[in-house]
Structures are given as structure tokens and as C-alpha cells.
Amino acid sequence: MVEINFFSDSNCSGLYPLNLLRCESTLHYGARSISVQWKEGLYSTENKIIRLNSRVLPTESSINTVSNLRPGNQWIYEGVLIAENVGLNEGKEVMVKKVPEFLENAAEIFERCGEGIMADLERLKHTWRTRSLSEEERSAWAETGVFVHGPMGRIHCAPGAVIRNCTLNTENGDVVLGPGSEVMEGSRVRGPFVLGEGSQIKMGSLIYGPTTVGAKCKIGGEVSNTVFHDYSNKAHGGFMGNSVIGSWCNLGAESSTSNLKNNYSEIKIWDERSQRLENSGRLFYGLLMGDHSKTAIHTEFNAGSIVGTFCNVFGLNTPTKHLKSFSWGEAGVHEIDKAIKTAKKVMNRRGIKMNTKQEASARELFKSLR
């Protein structure tokens, strides 16, 4: 069995605000977290303790490289420690030529979503014990109102997954439905797409891949190339594109984000290191939202908007492009005691208790911003 200890390096500011209050390894690469995929990828490796950079993606090449590290060996690239096998030295060796695949910035979470789905697909099917549909079932599914465009074999259903009358398109990628998940009536889904355990796609939703939805989420409206982390809801209408939403977020009815400027120019985003708006190098960029943030109904975000953690977004105007953590409306402060009280209520509804470490981290972040 492999024990993996993740560590953060000095190049994590590009993942703001998604890495506030959480290790970068808990962010999703495709449908599931980097850490979960690493643990499954290294599962068959003999007993060892691995220190692993939290930004390194669990690609097949990187998994093979880490698997082959002997005790005392290190993987270093351009002066950055990637991984090391902690143990009695068998003779120290440093690998410097092997190029890792890093998660460099938050936009790559949605940009590499399709790639992440494919990299994790076989492990995901095994873990969720999915059944892939067959061509012989096409007519039977059509009789129930489920129409499939593309290969039936690209639809993978875990135990308890429910598909109501809807349209599934697998021409460009697989559709994976996790345990106890549900696609409600009238929805139209284009792969690649993964719906997490216990999550729902609400009636009449329009989903364009590559998109992934974490566990225990409710998603509605129109969504394109977006990654939702666990326990977040966008249950009603509104458009969300080229975006990443953290955990425990809730987007009020008809909340929408622009993902393209009217003049088709490069989108600027907030840079946490320089503390100002910088060119992103991207034409399409929607919303980044940190954990535990919420929006009022009809909230409309500009392209390239960033919302920190524990924000309560409301007001008559379009929100500013950067709302720092614990924002209350445009200029107020979401006081820490009230923020934690709300978070505990939200988590308790899902049968989860906020632990003392999580609460302490939230209080420390609040204190650092004052």
C-alpha cells in the first residue's frame, strides 16, 4: 500500500481562489480530485511513502514515473521538487529530465477537463462499477424516451443511476453517470460529461461537454465546459461557461456568467501575485468561485470574474470582477462568525460536520484579510 503526502510549492498563486482553505491536490482534474486519482493510480505499487507535489496531474506518464522511484529517489524538474520516495536510502538518485504535467493555473481546470475525464475513465468505471450500454439496447432506450446520438458504448451507468426521457450525445466523448445520480426529464447532454455520485441534472437542462459535476450537486440551466466541485448547486436557469465552481457554493436562480467579451478581445483576470487585473491570454473565460460562496437570484458576472471564499454576492449592479473572500455584497464584510454559522448549517443538511481544523483555517484566512 502506498502512503501519499501532498505538499504545496511556491507556484500555487495561479490557482487562486480555488486553493484557499484547501490543498491543490483536492481540486478536480476532470471528474475527480487529483489526490483520489493519484491514490488509485498508485494502488498496486508496493509499500512505500511518497511525497508528491500537489499540482502534479495524475497522467499515465507521471504515475509510471512515480511508481518507479526507489527509496531515496527524487524527481526534480527545473529546480522544483515533483516527488520523492521517502525511505531508507538505496543510493540517492535525482531525475531531472522527465517533464511533469502541472496544473499551472485555475483556467486549466476547465480547459483540461476533457483530457482529465479520459485519463481517469477506466479507473472511474472500475471504482463506480459502471455498466456500459450496448448498441442492442438503443431501441429499448428510445422507447423509454432516451435518445442517443453516437456510440451507445460510450454511456456508462453506475448502480442506482437514473436516466429519464432525455437526449444524450456521445459523438465527441463519453457520458458517465455516477452511483445514485439522475438525469431528469427533458435534459440534453453532450459528452464528454461526468455526473458525480448522488448528483442531479434538473429538468430541461442543456449540458455541453467537456463538463463535470462533483458529488451531491444539483445542476440546471445551460452549462458549457465547466467543473463543479462537490456539494455545489446551480439548480435553476442561467448560463455558466468556461468556469470552475468550488465546493459548498450555491448560485441563485438565473445567475449567469459571460465567457466572451463583445469585442472578442483578450479577457483580463485578477492576478493574486501582482494584485491587479492581468491579461489571461484567453478569449473564453467565465467565473472562478471559491468554496462556500453564494449568489442572489439574477446575478450576472462579467467574463473573467473571480469570487473568493465565503462571499455573499448580491446587489443591483454587475459584481466587480474580483470579490475578495468574505465579501458581503459589493462593499460589506461577511463577518466570520456569521459565515461559519451559515457554513455549518449548509454542511449539516448533507450530514457533514465542519471540523475544528476547517473552522480554524477559515478564521485564519478572515484575520489575514482584515
Image: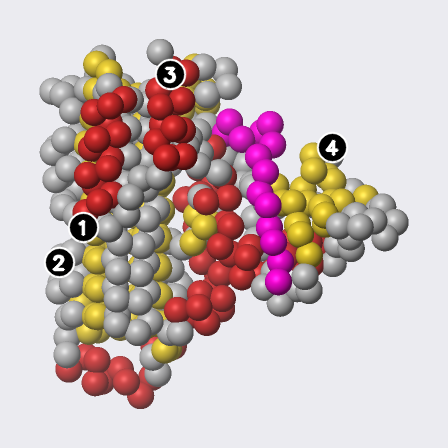
Q: Which mark is residue 203?
A: 2
**Viewer-closest of 286 and 51:** 51
Disc 3 residue crowd, few under 14, some 14–19, many 20+, Cα 10 Å? few
Q: Quadrant of residue 285?
A: top left
Circle 3 or circle 2, nearest the eye: 3
The amino acid pointed to by label 3 is Lys
N-term-proximal mark, 3 vs 2 = 2
Residue found at the very far front of the displayed protein:
356
N-term-proximal mark, 3 vs 1 = 1
Quarter of the C terminus within the rendering: top left
N-term-proximal mark, 1 vs 4 = 4
Disc 1 and disc 2 in contact, CB within 8 angstroms: yes
Disc 4 residue crowd, few under 14, some 14–19, many 20+, Cα 10 Å? few
- Report the residue marked by disc 4: 79
Q: What secondary structure is found at the residue carrying circle 3?
A: helix
Disc 1 and disc 4 in contact, CB within 8 angstroms: no
> From this viewpoint, is residue 370 visible?
yes
- The stretch of residues the image draws in magenta is 1-14
Separation of marks 1 and 4 at Cα, in angstroms = 45 Å
Disc 2 residue crowd, few under 14, some 14–19, many 20+, Cα 10 Å? many
Separation of marks 4 and 3 at Cα, in angstroms = 33 Å
Q: Which mark is residue 302?
A: none
- Picture residue at 69% right of the left edge, 64% below the top: 46
Separation of marks 2 and 4 at Cα, in angstroms = 51 Å
Q: Does residue 215 appear left or right of residue 24 in this picture?
A: left
**Viewer-closest of 61 and 214:** 214
